[in-house]
Amino acid sequence: MKSYIQLFTAIYLVLALTACQKFLDVSPKDDVSDEQTITDKASAETAIRGMYRSLADNGYYGSSFQSNSYLQGDNLDWTDSRTVSLQFLQHNVRPDNDEVQTVWTAIYETVNRANYAIAKIPGVQDPLFPQSERDQLLGEAYFVRALAYFDLGRTWGGVQLVLEPTESIAASKDLTRSSQADTYAQVLKDLEAAEPLLPLTTNRVRATRKTVWALRARLHLYRGEWAAANEYADKLTTDITNYPLQSPYNSFFANNAVGTPESVLETSYSANNTNAHRSQWQPPANGGTRRWAPNAAFLALVNDPAIGGNRSAMVAQTAQGQWYGNMYYRSPATDPAYVIRIAELFLISAEAQAQLNNLDSARINLNAVRNRAGLAPTTATTQQNILLAIENERRLEFAFEPHRWYDLVRTGRAAAVTGVTDVNKYVLPIPIQELSVDKSLVQNPGYN
Amino acid sequence: MKIVRIISWITLVIPLHALSQQVPKPQVNAVVSGKVLDEKTQHTISGATIQIKGVTNSTTSNESGSFSLYTGQKLPFVIVVSCVGYQSKEQQVADTLISVSLSESVQQLSDVVVVGYGTGQRKNLIGAHATVKADEINHLPVASFDAQLQGKAAGVQINSNSGMPGDAVNIRIRGTTSINAGNDPLYIVDGVFINDNSLSTLDLGGKTTSPLADINPTDIENIEVLKDATATAIYGSRGANGVVIITTKRGSYNAKARVSLNVLAGSAWAPKDRWWKLTTGPEHATLVNEQWINSGIDNPALNQNFANRPFRSKAEGGRGLPEEQQTYDRLDDVFRTAQLRNYDLSVSGGTKTTRYYIGGSYSKQEADIRPAAFDRASFKVNLDQKISDRVTVGVSSLISRTFRNQVREGTGPQGGIMQAALHTPTYLPKVNADGTPGRWAGFDNLQVLIDNYNVGTRSLRYIGNFYLDAEILKDLVFHTSWGMDYNNYKESQIWNDKTLIGLAPTNGLVTSSITENATWINEQTLTYKKTFNSKHNFGALLGNTVQSNVLTVNGETGSNFPNNSYTQISAAATRTATQSWTKFNLASFFSRLNYNYDNKYFIEVSARADGSSKFGKNNHWGYFPAAGVAWRLKEESFLQSSKVISDLKLRASYGITGNQNGIGNFAAQGLWTAGDSYPDNTGGADKPGTGPQQLSNTNLKWEKTAQANVGVDVGLFNSRLNITVDVYSKHTTDLLLAVQVPSRTGFDSYTTNAGEISNKGYEVGINSVNIDNGHFTWTTNFTISGNKNLIQKLATPIVYGDRDLIRLEQGHPMYSFWMYKQLYVDPKTGNSVFEDYNHDGQITAADRQILGNASPKFFGGITNTLTYKGFDLSVLFTYQYGNKVVSFDRILGEGGGVKDDSRMILAYNLKRWQQPGDITDVPRVTKVGNNYSIEQNSRFMEDGSFVRIKSLSIGYKFGGRLLNKLGIEPLRIYVLGSNLWLHTKYQGPDPESSHGIDPQGIDVGTPPAPRSLQVGLNATF
């Protein structure tokens, strides 16, 4: 009896101790190891979708990137208790503003996801992964990286250009900031890489060759390359089958519309992945928090039938008389976020033509947008007046989208229009937390 | 690993080996019977243990105080008689019929105290312990026992955080050792390591529920707090924040069934004189107008002037003149007088071989704000059965059901009940002119919330174990136990279409989730105790334990319901679901050796090896040694005869404990997440997407705390005055830290070992019998503790909390407030003058400084208990000194009218600068400049020191022959009050209020700890 027990115990112990190491190896079920990430067609596809989800994240196009920008325009009022929002309206943003940090983090997360795809997809060994799809996914990654660096560049000036995925912290090296010009050059490089890889199809939630053209048009406009801006904008404005300007203005967002012909690129949301914009715009009466709202000056413009036209549909009023922005209103909050709309391409074309002194062409493109808004053709005739008319048109057309402030900065009109004379305030401060953990990063002037 | 193998061999083989041996039959040489009496009252004492000195043979006195002892020893011998609450007594026995009188213990030197994996006598302790008898505190109207400990145990700091019953409190034993790995002590209930992390998944505005509230405090016999390394290192990786051992009530052998009934009822309310003081409607309007005009002066581009001020007459298109505004009081609507009810019934007793305790309890506590309430029903069974003289088996089990009607306090605008009540501007009507509910400033209508709030949580909890004790050889005891902590936590949150969150177009929003936390734990120990030559006392402990924990969450959300009658998610048109699963395993081996010479010189060493699945492959195992020595001077010849000094002992210890709590179970692994779905085509549905989640760190390892402790225990005047003083120094290295990394990597942080924290402090506990003349007694219990915390090493500062109010920085204590220092308000201009810390001529983020922190310099409590004949009176004062509180309510509520209709204004804002010469700390109201745009203004940081009457009870015990004949022992009726008085400079309702557990010291929208009065009756049959 005694010896049996000892034998049994000995066997038990041997089993127990060999099992011990196994006992201490527990793997998660919610997530998977990062040792096998992009290995075949299916995993390449899921990684690309994950990259778009990051682009659509609430820190990026979902909300904060857009709001940090449009709050700096002159259309909104602060109706919140958080002075972080007020700082944007007052052009007095502090480096410890957490919304600035949120956007910085969200955009670089998108960059990292694009970098993963760019680094891994070419090497994937999968006979069932056709070259055409491989090219397409790779092209999409180049496009998204281009868009991310474009947004970083226009918000902060030149940034650190990270072009490799981060697979370990140890491998991450010091990196100095590039200039804004170099950042835009990288954007162009990525767009040039994406263009031949992508198919010439129409997809309003993902990048195609046409989406690349649209972003190129915008990039050339920002760089003052008028002919190129016009050339690439016209590639879409002339594609009236796929990109007609539909009337009235609200046809692209009212009645729960998604993916309308207006959208060159919009980010997509679902009940599981919602867009935070709605709750920030809608008043409490509609279940929102109304963190900001259209200001009196803008309301006067947008509600003037001769100026706002049918764009007045983007604002609404509660029974108690509170005005609010009404572009985002759905429940569940699946409102798309608009990255590039066809109206912008018409106005890019108009501006480029005006700069090239092709005033008639400029007026035609401008009037296309005015006509859609239910307005009479522009009365501007001189180059200067047409450019001013385009500026004002853009203010109303993209009131709740991230354009106005960037437009005023790139055209050198910010001081004249908003009274902000300190050019240092034309870009946002680098988040203070980034500076404290990254010695190779320097603050923008005027924010120390 | 070799050591581990040897230990496991010993723990498993020896007991089995021993069990297989034949147990010889005892031989009876003597039968001693007698009675145990209370020396003073001469009442019999039941449940006393009578043991023959030097051997293990023992018995227990029955309900009439009698006992019989059969022994193989020959007369005469010495017996040791001990009983909880009495001093143990050694008595020479020469006769077979004896009587033993015990005197009530004041000093508790011979009290049995619980230590890690065993018990010991207080006089032999080397480690720093604090013992709290549960019956001193367990009727306080806070739902969990940890909240009841405030002021009772030296070195244990407790902050109530909120007046909501059943919410988690903040508890720190000897300071804060960790940034990310958790700072709660380890809680052990009857040998089961229990979960104390909230399972709540709901957004409760920063608050969380306490899983400890599942345990009925009246089932607890004793709470032992282990503080220094000798006491805690046997718990290795779980011991760094101290260990709280809870022992529940058990029956007595040979005792008649004893039925105990306790009924307690009363009410609780938030004292009105401490509510927030708000501006009236006209005052609010005046401030808004004033800032409007001032802002217009400061920045003409705003085009703001007297003519277009918001509160001008309605005829001019304004909102009406300030004096025309109404004032709507919402605080009166939300606060209430809450009802408290508590019923406890227990039966305990035993036969010669069986003892039992059965307890049932129901408790209902309403919060001082509508409509929150906490309700708990629990059932407890403890059973012990002697199979033979050498083998005992038993179970401890606790089953409880708690139900909470919860509200969102703190932050979170839409469903936040305190926000709706407190933060809505007072001039805005509750009901609109058209009869619809008024919703303002992003908040819901208060009455709508009160009427429709339906956030319910149900927790089902089982904590229990099965054990077997076998004396396999003389002096060698084998113990095995299999325990379980299971918690099924169901939450449902119903926002119908009347509430803001559920309004059209959402048409009702319901979330429902079930969180399951299951831990199983198994342990084996071998305990050896032996005295050689009557002077060498030797003890050894060897053991192993394995445990595993799985946490799962299944949740679903539905919106778009047909109407409010449907609340099940299956009725919703839009449904989403989530599921998560996480697990960790822990395997441990431990040993302890102790030796004392003649009860004079004590030495103890212990070691534990812990293997955790949470860490990197290279660092699964951690080793935690400790050693302690003590010298009991009282036993030396020069003190033995001293009349003044009745006890004197010096203690010292050093050891290492670990921590692994707060980090994720898979923190060491590099992970990709799924769920980032996105469509492929325009108008298409989401398809699966993946992305990087966290970076791996295969070197991740244990956070370690080295602690040194020296202490002295002094007893004076025949133990009338007992003083315990401890001084300690804790140094934590290899902090488990979510280190911020540059975001350009695509990640914002990763978990690694970095940084060091130190805690140095002292604790003093004094017990004194001031008067005891037979009829009248007056005793005092006093604790004071101080702790100095410092971050010794941290490569980059970490900021967190709302508005980055908290900053962790090397050279500063944890939870330091990072603010702009307002020096004064310029009497000429009315502008805030901030300190230009870096002297660059402008006020930027670089001028923020660390200006104070949320930890007190010292804290404690004082209890005075007086008894006179049948009357008793007990008062507990608790206090805290030197901690700072940042009032977030003031940050939001002293917006100077800049926030217009989006936030209430506190009355303090009326002290703003108005004209040159005004001396005030409240700047001129304007939207322009820094006066109101810098929210992290140091003027919102206040002194949070306080003294309060935590509890006061007055009781009367009455007996009489009639009751006695009915078999009823004296009845006690009593009145119990809590928080009856508070002294503090803090402006808010309660200086203990905190937005969350971590960080501490930020107060926003939190209902204060209520004042309460209850009447109770205690009867025993």
Image (spheres, coloured by chain):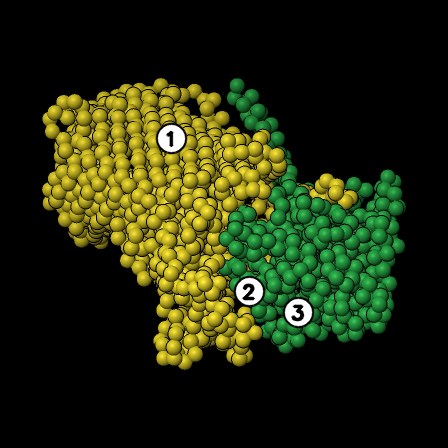
Chain colours: A green, B yellow
**Which chain does the numbered disc 3 sit on?**
A
Residue A6 location (% of width, % of height): 55, 25
| x then y, percent, for residue A445 | 64, 75
Assess disc 2: are there few (<14), some (14-19) or many (≥20) residues with their C-alpha within 10 Å of its C-alpha: many
Q: Nearer the viewer, mark 3 or mark 1?
A: 3
Q: CA distance from mark 1 to mark 2?
A: 52 Å
State the residue in front, B542 or B174: B174
- Total numbered circles: 3
How dense is the environment of label 1, judged by Cα within 10 Å: few (below 14), some, or many (20 and up)?
many
Q: Secondary structure at mark 3?
A: loop
Element on which disc 1 rests = strand
As drawn, is B189 to the left or to the right of B957? right
Q: Residue at x 32, y 24 (%)?
A: B355
Q: Is residue B580 visible?
A: yes
Residue A155, x across and y down, in percent: 68, 65
Rounded to the nearest angstrom, the CA distance separating label 2 from label 3 is 16 Å
Disc 3 with disc 1 on a shared chain: no
* Camera-nearest label, 2 or 3: 2
Foreground: disc 1 or disc 2: 2
In the rendered image, which residue does mark 1 sit on? B378
Q: Residue furthest front?
A: B315
Which quadrant holds the C terminus of chain B? top left
Identify the residue at image location x=44%, y=65%. Answer: B312
Pointer 2: what residue? A86
